[in-house]
Amino acid sequence: MPIGAAWIPPSFIGVTTGIDMRVVLLVFAKAPVPGRVKTRLRRAWGAQGACRWYRRLLAATVETAVAADAAAVELWCAPDRAHPVLRRLAARHALPLHAQPPGDLGARMLHAARLVLRRADAVIIIGADCTPLTAGQLRDAVAALAGGRDLVLTPAEDGGYVLIGMRRSVAMLFRGVDWGTDRVLRQTRTRIRRCRLRATELPASWDVDRPADVRRLLREGRLRRWGRG
């Protein structure tokens, strides 16, 4: 399967905003393999438990993205789209299922954005562990792009970001960034200024990396406890 190729359900219908603008929301996800996802949760729940939490986070994030009803949602998977959990999740919500391109996070986001912008007016990218994002926040991101902004960003409390959306791809935003550090947001803001992009920053949110983050989600009622996923 070539990079960017997708399985698209026959029932898939693109979502268009009220001002006739097509926005596609990409959920970046990894195959839920024990020991390869949410490794910082292992000290509390072990590799199997961390993987199970990851599956819950992914399912909840996709459910929120679909419920927002503001953009066409697609599932972009690494290393490929073969894992049965990913295929079942895509089928459950009738979502296109794509394989992520190779490279670091920046290369994968840039390549995916370029592919999608060939067939859409704007693209938004979030991660599978961005479960704290609400449907309202996703709609706000779409509205910012529909209102003419070049870029929309939701900062993360840890110095990164949990959502980025754009009307055109800008390579500088994704190359040479110190991914996984608290410098990501600062570096991205600097590049936005250098590129003179008309950008909107939405209120900060957070992603789920540590046991304390899972417990915070549970306290706030944003994630169900153990269950099927």
Image (tube, grey):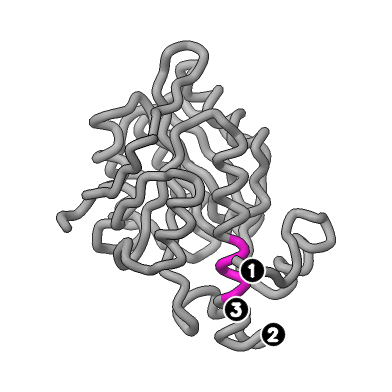
Residue indicated by mark 3:
50
Quarter occupied by the C terminus = bottom right
Residue indicated by mark 1:
228
Residue indicated by mark 2:
44
Question: Disc 3 to disc 2, how far (Cα)?
Answer: 8 Å
- Local packing at callout 1 (Cα closer than 10 Å; few below 14, some 14-19, many 20+) is few
Q: Quadrant of residue 136?
A: top right
Residue at x-position 39% and y-position 23%: 22
Does 104 appear in magenta? no
- Local packing at callout 2 (Cα closer than 10 Å; few below 14, some 14-19, many 20+) is few
Which mark is first along the chain, 3 or 1?
3
Q: Judging from the image, what secondary structure is the residue with disc 1 in?
A: loop
Which is more toward the observer, 41 or 72? 72
Give, as a three-letter code, the residue at label 3: Ala
Whether tag 3 and tag 2 are in contact, CB under 8 A, the answer is yes
Can residue 136 be seen by looking at this rendering?
yes
**Which label is found at residue 133?**
none
Count the numbered circles shown: 3
Which residues, given as a range, are shown in magenta?
52-57
Which mark is first along the chain, 2 or 3?
2
Q: Position of residue 190 (x, y in %)?
A: 44, 42
Q: Position of residue 220 (x, y in %)?
A: 82, 55
Q: Judging from the image, what secondary structure is the residue with disc 2 in?
A: helix
Give the farthest residue toward the right. 219
Give, as a three-letter code, the residue at label 1: Arg
Q: Quadrant of residue 83?
A: bottom left
Whether tag 1 and tag 3 are in contact, CB under 8 A, the answer is no
Q: Position of residue 8 (x, y in %)?
A: 31, 43
Q: Nearer the viewer, mark 1 or mark 3?
A: 1
What predominant SS class does the magenta segment belong to? helix
Q: Position of residue 178 (x, y in %)?
A: 41, 62
